[in-house]
Image (cartoon, rainbow, N blue to C red):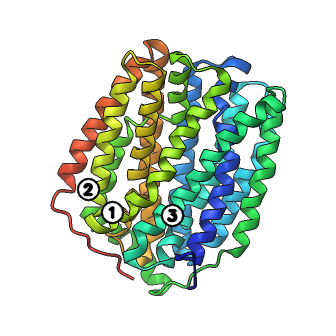
Amino acid sequence: MEKIWGIKRNVFFLGLVSFFNDFSAEMVHSVMPVFLTMVLGAPAFMVSLIEGVADAASSVLKFLSGYVSDRIQRRKTPAILGYALSVGVRPFLALVANAWQVLGLRFVDRVGKGLRDAPRDALIVESVESHELGKSFGFHRSLDTLGATLGPLAAFLLLPLLGMNFRHLFLVAFVVGLAALLSFGFVRDVRRREAPPPETVRISRWQTIRRTPGFLAVIFAIFVFGLGSLPPALLLLRAKEVGFGIGMIPIVYLIYNLAFVLTAIPLGRLADRIGERTVITAGFGVASLTYFGLAGNIGMAMLIALFVLLGVYSAATDGLQRVLASRFLPASVIGTGQGFLNLAIGFSSLGASIIGGLLWTQVGSWAGLIYAGTLSFLGLILFGWLTRGSMRPGIIK
């Protein structure tokens, strides 16, 4: 497969798809906490609940879509359907009258994410050689996050021009999202290098997953860590508490995403040299320290610094978790394996959203953040213990 700027064609265009989709999505998400609490009058717990339920829903679909894409030996079709569903739901946000309607639309949006993520990640894995995985996922995640960085900036610049009308902003975001669907036309399905008969796949798929202890250990450790991973939408309310005005909230989110996009590729390349486990472990440690820092009596400058660290943590873990998990699995179950990983992340995110959101609302933001820091630290210890001595087994193609 030919390359564009040193990146395999599929990875390049999948990066563009994610760029435009996240540009559109983060125009919405960067203002959603303020829209929910100040326009619709929802409590902080509702902000967290919406994100947790949405992520859990997407994770169930990620698991199923990964399994189905393994069965039909196609990645592109479920992925493009997922992107179309997520983009198509955004204009309806301009019509909502209460937080429960937002929850319903976010649910549908995350169903779209659930349909696309596992097949898309499997398509990336199958489009490149094993030694290029870290760089490829880093490139994809950096373009994804570049879009997520420019989206909040666009929201910051457009809101005054739109008379601070959030609903008009949601319509602009929908138009931007259409470019993601157009970019997908340049993505090609990849014929799997190893394609066993359907009967063999049906019999061996679950046995392969169950008999891979390294993969299961990674999934369990990531699940425990995820129980302390609070959604960014909730963390943005901390910026409001510290003293940032409504119009500046998207800028705080932009800083978080900018830190991600600047470090994703370097950290991916570093992981290709020293191993994903080392980089992920460091990322988990940064997350725990950052949550504890946010819980303290801080000013605006310190909050900005901590959001930069949150971006570095995400860059060190997000794509690399997928790489590490995939290294333990043969090609016939890559999609299913990515689905398992996303399922674990989604349900741990739901737990973190409910527990952290309740503590935030009923006790105070400091309580939710102390909880997040503690669970993140426990996840770090567990990850280091369960994956100790793990090899880089390589992908069986």
298 and 278: which is toward the camera: 298
Mark found first going from the N terminus, 2 or 1: 1
Considering every residue shown, the one lying at the far front of the view is: 301
134 and 220: which is toward the camera: 134
Give the amino acid type for the residue marked by disc 1 in the picture. Answer: Ala
- Disc 2 to disc 3, how far (Cα)? 19 Å
* Residue sitting at x 21%, y 68%: 391
| Circles 2, 1 touching at the beta carbon (< 8 Å) | yes
Q: Residues within 10 Å of mark 2 (few under 14, many from 20)?
A: few
Q: Is residue 279 visible?
A: yes
For mark 2, give the secondary structure: helix
Report x, y in % for residue 193. Answer: 47, 87
Where does label 1 land, which residue?
271
For mark 1, give the secondary structure: helix
Give the amino acid type for the residue marked by disc 3 in the picture. Answer: Phe
361 and 16: which is toward the camera: 16
Depicted 152 relative to depicted 180: above or below: above
* Residue sitting at x 21%, y 56%: 387
* Residue sitting at x 56%, y 32%: 252
- Disc 3 to disc 1, how far (Cα)? 13 Å
Mark found first going from the N terminus, 3 or 1: 3
3 on left or right of 155? left
Where does label 2 land, which residue?
278
342 on left or right of 22? left
- Disc on res. 139: 3
- Disc on res. 243: none
Quadrant, the N terminus:
bottom right
Q: Residues within 10 Å of mark 1 (few under 14, many from 20)?
A: many
Report x, y in % for residue 122. Answer: 50, 69
Give the amino acid type for the residue marked by disc 2 in the picture. Answer: Thr
Q: Residues within 10 Å of mark 3 (few under 14, many from 20)?
A: many
